[in-house]
Image: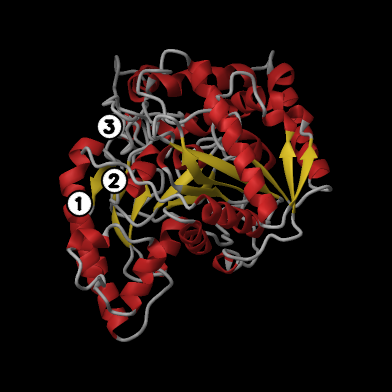
């Protein structure tokens, strides 16, 4: 059945690449596929809580403009393709709050570079997606709008599961067919962990590949934008458009963006793939270990050579991250004072009271926890003991990777220490929650590209993912290996529709 003959809802199940091809071939119009998504969002969002703003009129206007271009045989790489945008990316004229009360109804007068790149290539905006407040969290429970629901459920269970954090809304939306793909961001695993929890592909590029201009800042030396998508090819296509050099971001890399879609499907014969022994952690479920071994076997079968490597400072990665990230957050979030923009609480009328009351009422508990940690480690008596030491550990972690990459071209590891967990199952214990980032955080500290892709289901029918970490600027290796694993795993499972 061609898309032209199929019911409208089937358009929402297309991959991004197939949708773009279908639009160019005029099998359906941008207006048709956009309306199909808006109908789905209307029906499903009350149960899933993926979107915090739906921009229906804007989407149809953009779709109309795309159809006019497509009719003339013109248009960009993503012409007419409906996408979801994480509520961290400033969108001109559309409310952007990073899912925090402190930003109130803030509506930017400018566009983030990443979203501008998407609009320049013809994408259609369906709306803004739910996330952890200021991207601080691993379960999307800290959002002012309440958590989204993972479309996946455990077999014979109605327990509400997390879609991961902080990009939980993006993962929910793509996994439940509420957009073709979505923007996300990754500070310590916020793209790759939600990808693993929802059976999706998510990549964090090399630090500096994507501009941070117009992204609400959490930890400036760690934050990086990337996509959540249904396939490795879709992720490559999204990343090609999202990345660019940018004079508005001093950390942006002014380098040509490769055609990563051409890496997908390339042979990995002769490639050396490293397996770091430190990623075998105490208490890791047996099925994660089994999946990892399966991934290694798939890479071997595709002609890659497997090399055992060591990253000795891995055990210090999480402690270092939970010093560096909160320190940078306490500096970045000092700008939210209730004076210049966002929500204001006046207190007793004095300036100090306005600051204090605004921040006490505007920031949620997790954000306050991290700001306190960050301010503490930057304070005069503790700066050397904590912050400088954490930066030195970070350098050691980068050196570990540099040594390992002398022996191999990419690393293969698990993406998460478990499948998606239920809401409330880890919320009382911040440390248990922080351990979710154990396999992902090293790539952020070292600024390396890393991709997560689905590789199987656990005993309860939930998706499990593997991760490929590449050398700096070698996203190509990530896409090549990920595509081989994707093909070998032939992961076609979809969540059973309960919503």
* Residue for badge 3: 145
**Where is the N terminus found, in terms of image quarters?**
bottom left
Q: Residue furthest bottom?
A: 72
* Residue for badge 2: 95
* Of labels 1 and 3, the one closer to you: 1
> Are the residues tagged 1 and 2 within 8 Å (C-beta)?
no
Relative depth, front residue between 463 and 218: 463
Badge 3: residue crowd in 10 Å (few <14, some 14–19, many ≥20): some
| Position above or below: 61 against 316 | below
**Where is the C terminus found, in terms of image quarters?**
top left
Relative depth, front residue between 451 and 93: 451
**Element type at marker 2?**
loop
Q: Locate residue 339 relative to residue 456 in the image: left or right.
A: left
Relative depth, front residue between 358 and 404: 404
Q: Position of residue 184 (x, y in %)?
A: 44, 46
Badge 2: residue crowd in 10 Å (few <14, some 14–19, many ≥20): many
**Element type at marker 1?**
helix
* Of labels 1 and 2, the one closer to you: 1
**Element type at marker 3?**
loop
* Residue for badge 1: 40
Q: Earlier in the sequence, mark 1 or mark 2?
A: 1
Q: Is residue 298 shown to the viewer in this render?
A: yes
- Quarter location, residue 125: bottom left
């Amino acid at each position: 059945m061609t898309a032209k003959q199929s019911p409208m809802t089937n358009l929402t199940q297309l991959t991004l690449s197939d949708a773009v091809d279908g639009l160019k071939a005029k099998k359906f119009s941008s207006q048709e596929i956009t309306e199909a998504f808006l109908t789905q969002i209307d029906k499903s969002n009350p149960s899933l809580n993926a979107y915090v703003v739906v921009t229906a009129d804007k989407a149809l206007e953009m779709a109309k403009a795309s159809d006019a271009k497509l009719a003339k045989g013109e248009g960009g790489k993503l012409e007419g393709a409906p996408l979801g945008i994480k509520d961290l990316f400033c969108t001109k004229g559309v409310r952007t709050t990073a899912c925090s009360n402190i930003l109130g109804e803030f509506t930017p007068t400018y566009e983030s570079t990443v979203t501008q790149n998407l609009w320049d290539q013809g994408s259609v905006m369906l709306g803004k997606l739910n996330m952890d407040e200021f991207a601080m969290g691993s379960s999307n429970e800290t959002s002012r709008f309440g958590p989204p629901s993972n479309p996946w459920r455990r077999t014979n269970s109605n327990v509400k599961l997390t879609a991961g954090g902080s990009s939980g809304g993006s993962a929910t939306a793509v996994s439940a067919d509420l957009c073709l793909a979505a923007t996300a961001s990754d500070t310590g695993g916020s793209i790759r962990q939600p990808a693993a929890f929802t059976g999706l592909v998510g990549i964090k590029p090399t630090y500096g590949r994507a501009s941070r201009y117009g992204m609400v800042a959490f930890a400036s030396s760690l934050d990086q934008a990337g996509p959540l998508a249904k396939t490795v090819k879709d992720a490559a296509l999204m990343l090609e458009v999202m990345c660019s050099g940018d004079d508005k971001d001093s950390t942006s890399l002014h380098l040509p963006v490769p055609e990563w879609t051409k890496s997908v499907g390339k042979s990995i014969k002769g490639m050396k793939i490293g397996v770091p022994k430190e990623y075998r952690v105490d208490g890791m479920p047996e099925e994660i270990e089994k999946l990892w071994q399966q991934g290694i076997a798939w890479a071997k079968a595709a002609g890659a050579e497997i090399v055992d490597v060591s990253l000795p400072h891995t055990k210090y990665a999480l402690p270092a991250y939970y010093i560096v990230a909160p320190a940078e957050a306490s500096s970045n979030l000092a700008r939210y004072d209730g004076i210049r923009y966002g929500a204001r609480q006046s207190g007793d009328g004095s300036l100090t009271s306005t600051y204090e009351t605004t921040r006490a009422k505007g920031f949620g508990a997790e954000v306050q926890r991290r700001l306190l940690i960050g301010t503490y480690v930057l304070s005069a008596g503790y700066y050397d003991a904590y912050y400088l030491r954490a930066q030195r550990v970070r350098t050691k972690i980068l050196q570990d990777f540099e040594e390992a990459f002398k022996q191999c071209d990419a690393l293969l590891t698990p993406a998460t220490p478990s499948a998606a967990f239920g809401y409330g199952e880890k919320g009382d214990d911040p440390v248990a929650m922080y351990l979710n980032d154990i396999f992902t955080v090293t790539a952020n500290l070292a600024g390396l590209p890393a991709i997560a892709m689905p590789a199987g289901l656990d005993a309860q029918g939930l998706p499990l993912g593997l991760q490929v970490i590449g050398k700096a600027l070698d996203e190509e290796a990530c896409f090549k290996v990920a595509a081989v694993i994707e093909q070998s795993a032939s992961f076609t499972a979809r969540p059973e529709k309960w919503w």
